[in-house]
Image (cartoon, helix red, strand yellow):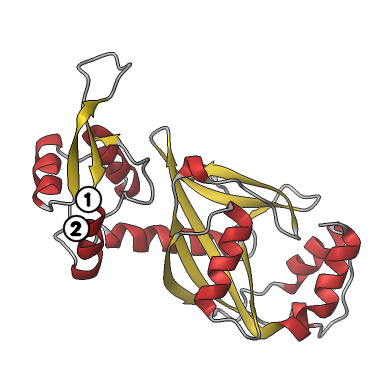
């Protein structure tokens, strides 16, 4: 977005969006055995942030989150979960906000809509890494994937938001399946186990994992094997979408 368009956005935001409310999105992907998170590089800066946005006057919170994520990823259908409200009085750091606006060539007066205190609703999304087309927003120069352990200190309280989302995702493993939105349509059992281990941050016993995950009956074995691997070609699986959705609603035992 050009500087003129960004200024128009700032000037007209109070007529378009709700006051005091924003949302921040933690977009998780999985690639090359690493859990990834989608981040934005702030304009003319080396600081990074989570994707986020505001809620239009006639929008629900969920509709706004879907819109923001579509703008950042290019995806229409996304697994999305609201996980926390961030309301610390000090989270809206006006000094840092002003610094970001100055780098974008914009100045706003004290008391401006953009400088007010915002409560932010956190959403996390699970996406297939290979399907995402990252797009920066009005306040950023770049949008890119980062390894979850290499993000460094993000702007404002975004590091706290990120690690709260990761904490909730780990808890989800105890009662809901994970993988359908993070893995490609066909995958091996070692790839699924690696996903679980990466999220949990610990090793899992191979035999116990296989036995337990198969007991949920959410996987469908395919008449195919992974080709081009150094060792014995592993069995390929896909998720049984009907049983997977049932497990999301009814829950299951943890890994």
How many other residues sit within 10 Å of disc 2, few (<14), some (14-19) or many (≥20)?
A: some
- In the image, residue 169 sits, relative to residue 65, either above or below, namely above
- In the image, residue 55 sits, relative to residue 245, either above or below, namely below
For the point 88% across and 80% down, the residue is: 109
The picture quadrant where one finds residue 211 is top left
Q: Is 1 left, or right, of 55 in this rendering?
A: right
Q: Exactly how many numbered labels are in the figure?
A: 2
Please say if the residues under marks 1 and 2 sit with CB atoms less than 8 Å apart: yes
In the image, 47 versus 192, the foreground residue is 192
* Picture coordinates of residue 94, whole percent (x, y): 75, 73
For the point 19% across and 46% down, the residue is: 219
In the image, 96 versus 18, the foreground residue is 18
Residue projecting furthest to the top: 230
For the point 86% across and 62% down, the residue is: 102
Q: Is 34 left, or right, of 208 in this rendering?
A: right
* Picture coordinates of residue 74, whole percent (x, y): 59, 53
Q: What is the CA distance from the residue labelled 1 to the residue labelled 2?
A: 6 Å
* Picture coordinates of residue 244, whole percent (x, y): 23, 57
* Picture coordinates of residue 43, whole percent (x, y): 78, 53
Name the residue tied to disc 2.
243
In the image, 8 versus 218, the foreground residue is 218
For the point 64% across and 60% down, the residue is: 155
Please say whether residue 154 is visible from this viewpoint. no
Name the residue tied to disc 1.
240
Please say whether residue 185 is visible from this viewpoint. yes
Helix, strand or loop status at disc 2? helix
In the image, 46 versus 32, the foreground residue is 32
Helix, strand or loop status at disc 1? loop
- In the image, residue 13 sits, relative to residue 67, either above or below, namely below
Q: Is 239 left, or right, of 63 in this rendering?
A: left
How many other residues sit within 10 Å of disc 1, few (<14), some (14-19) or many (≥20)?
A: some
């Amino acid at each position: 977005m050009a500087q003129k368009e960004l200024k128009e956005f700032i000037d007209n935001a109070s007529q378009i969006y709700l006051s005091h409310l924003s949302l921040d999105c933690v977009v998780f992907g999985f690639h090359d055995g690493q859990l990834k998170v989608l981040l934005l590089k702030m304009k003319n800066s080396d600081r990074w942030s989570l994707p986020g946005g505001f809620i239009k006057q006639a929008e629900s919170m969920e509709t706004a989150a879907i819109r923001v994520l579509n703008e950042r990823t290019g995806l229409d259908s996304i697994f999305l979960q609201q996980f926390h409200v961030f309301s610390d009085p000090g989270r809206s750091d006006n000094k840092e906000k002003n610094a970001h606006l100055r780098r974008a060539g914009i100045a706003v007066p004290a008391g401006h809509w953009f400088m007010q205190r915002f409560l932010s609703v956190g959403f996390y999304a699970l996406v297939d890494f290979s399907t995402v087309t990252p797009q920066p927003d009005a306040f950023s120069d770049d949008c890119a994937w980062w390894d979850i352990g290499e993000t460094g200190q993000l702007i404002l309280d975004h590091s706290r938001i990120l690690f709260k989302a990761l904490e909730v995702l780990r808890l989800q493993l105890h009662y809901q399946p994970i993988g359908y939105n993070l893995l490609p349509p066909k995958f091996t059992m070692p790839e699924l186990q690696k996903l679980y281990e990466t999220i949990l941050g610990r090793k899992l016993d191979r035999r116990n994992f296989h036995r337990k995950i198969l007991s949920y009956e959410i996987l469908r074995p395919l008449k195919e094997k992974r080709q081009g691997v150094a060792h014995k070609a592993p069995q390929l699986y896909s998720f049984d979408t009907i049983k997977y959705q049932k497990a999301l609603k009814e829950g299951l035992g943890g890994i």
